[in-house]
Image: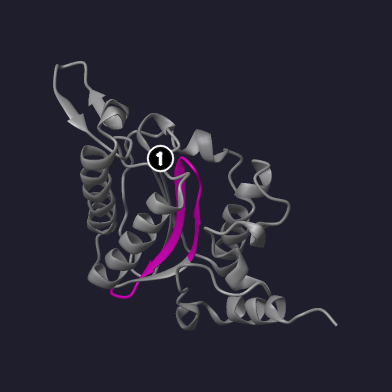
Amino acid sequence: MPNETPGERSKFKTCKRYNDAGHARALTFCCLRRQKFLASPRTSQWLVDAIDLARRKHQFNLWAYVIMPEHVHLIVCPRRDDYDVSRFLSTLKLSVTRKALAFVRQEKPTSLPLMLDAQPNGNSHYRFWQRGGGFDRNLWSEKVIFAEIDYIHANPVRRGLCAKPEEWAWSSAGDYGSHGPGPLSIDFASLPRSLQTVRRSRSRPPR
């Protein structure tokens, strides 16, 4: 596993995407200027709906996720050999941005400056997400996929937001343990067989 923290990962403004057939993808992206736009249940639910929309529209399986107050981790796997992660992310991000802008303009106009992204060239745009591609990593082995899932599930614990990964409501950690499903269904049937076995063993209640 890489040694970088989620904060260090999200500093990448651009990334080169390799849409290799059969590879799962670890995606990390953050809110504009790492503001805690996702700290409220409302905005987190917008993101949950957007992830579900994007995976259905672009035919991706969702294997794991963690929604943090200011950034997001996803592990997805394309269902087809011909796919484009950029389109998946564009659908997801645009859906959340539109809902956020509409809400802020109508309900909290004084918060609109928080979404203003004034660029050095003089252009200005309202954004929910940080510019750039975020962090994108191809996952090609079951061992690496398993390690990445555990790594992102532990993110809220490392931040001191909860004591155990499955206690974080906006995460798939509970789906892999015995705490029950989270707000997004996980496409367990598409997981590699070894990961399905691990998941079943973890989901058994202790005797």
Helix, strand or loop at disc 1?
loop
Q: Which residue is mark 1?
A: 37
Residue drawn 55% across and 73% down? 181
In the image shown, does 84 or 74 lie closer to the viewer?
Answer: 74
Classed neighbour count for the residue bearing mark 1: other residues with Cα under 10 Å, few (<14), some (14–19), many (≥20): many
Identify the image's colour scheme: rainbow, by chain, secondary structure or one colour. one colour
In the image: residue 86, left or right of residue 144: left
Residue most extreme to the right = 207
Task: Check the picture and name the quadrant holding the C terminus.
Answer: bottom right
In the rendered view, tell whether residue 84 sits above or below residue 112.
below
Residue 91 falls in which quadrant of the image? Answer: bottom left
Is 81 one of the magenta-colored residues? no
The residues colored magenta run 64-80
In the image shown, does 95 or 90 lie closer to the viewer?
Answer: 95
Residue 63's spot in the image, x, y percent? Answer: 48, 68
Residue 126 falls in which quadrant of the image? Answer: top left
Residue 118's spot in the image, x, y percent? Answer: 22, 21
Residue drawn 36% across and 55% down? 47
Identity, as a three-letter code, of the amino acid under mark 1: Phe
In the image: residue 162, left or right of residue 128: right
Is 75 one of the magenta-colored residues? yes
Residue drawn 52% across and 35% down? 7
In the image: residue 188, left or right of residue 102: right
Residue 43's spot in the image, x, y percent? Answer: 38, 50
Main SS of the magenta part reads strand
Residue 3's spot in the image, x, y percent? Answer: 61, 40
